Amino acid sequence: MTIEENVEEFLESLDSSADDKPKYSNTLYKKWFRSKTQSGFVAIKPWFEGMKFSIDIGKTNQSGKLESNTNCFVDAVDFSAYLRSIANGTALANFPANERLSLPHPESFVSYGGAMTAAGNPISRIFKCQYWSNGDVIDTNNFVWKSGHFKARKSDTGAFIPDMKSPLSVDSIKVSRQDIASISYLCDLSLVSFVSNNTEWYDA
């Protein structure tokens, strides 16, 4: 995929099926956004073979062409638990602020969304959800979802350790509490459907 590809064609490709693709590979949720300064999309796609959700956030230019995007993988159960906590009002207790993870406010979530190597350099992908802010003003009724590439170093065990102060690219989208309630319901339905039809997943 190149940045010259049309975003509509790109999103349609997320829905395409092939014999070697995992079950439930169709896009579960997608939304376009447009403001005075930017436009883009978010798309969520299950990958249940790895018990993950793929979250793809991208920017488009004035002519609708893709400028950038970042695709992160989050744990399906952890992400669904977070969304449900936001939707049912328990996230203040279940997801308190965590300065160590660079989450200064409660009701936040961060996930290390995969690793890659570019030009021989290790890179980590990170997904984060936190309150929307405008300067010093925090809006607790809306959230910003961010997905980004960060410089990383490779440990002796081969793990990629991101440098949170060295972002290479970041894509973001504003998501309301109402949006999260809908996304949470969709994620729950897809997980229940998958587990119900794949009982070996939880059989001892």
Image (spheres, grey):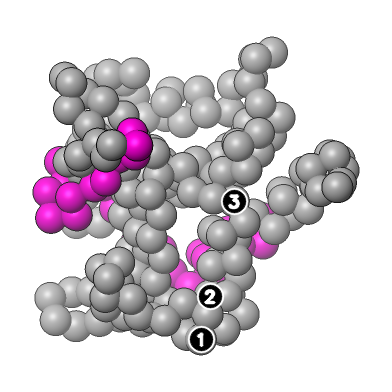
Give the residue at the far front of this rendering: 156
Amino acid type, mark 3 = Ala
Query: Would residue 204 be found to the left or right of residue 129 on screen?
Result: right
Crowdedness near tag 1: few (<14), some (14–19) or many (≥20) residues, C-alpha within 10 Å: few
User: Which residue is tagged 1?
Assistant: 93
Q: Are marks 3 and 1 in contact (CB under 8 Å)?
A: no
Q: Position of residue 91 (x, y in %)?
A: 51, 80
> From the viewer's perspective, is the residue at label 1 or at label 2 nearer?
1
Q: Is residue 11 above or below residue 89?
A: above
Distance from the alpha carbon under mark 1 to that under mark 2: 10 Å
* Percent of width and height locating residue 183: 58, 59
Q: Looking at the image, can residue 127 be seen?
A: yes
Asked whether residue 169 is in view, the answer is no
Q: Which mark is residue 76?
A: 3
Image quarter (top left, top right, bottom left or bottom right) of the N terminus: top left
How many C-alpha atoms fall within 10 Å of the one at disc 2: few (<14), some, or many (≥20)? many
Rounded to the nearest angstrom, the CA distance separating label 3 from label 1 is 21 Å
Q: Which amino acid does the dot numbered 2 rest on? A: Ile
Q: Which residues are magenta?
A: 157-186
Q: Is residue 49 magenta-colored?
A: no
Disc sitting over residue 86 in the figure: 2
Residue 199 or 142: which is nearer the viewer? 199
Looking at the image, which residue is at 21% across and 23% down? Answer: 118
For residue 117, which quarter of the picture?
A: top left
Task: Kindly identify which numbered label has been placed on residue 198.
Answer: none
Identify which residue is drawn at 27% across, 19% down. 2
Residue plotted at (33% across, 33% down): 158
Q: Nearer the viewer, residue 15 or 98?
A: 98
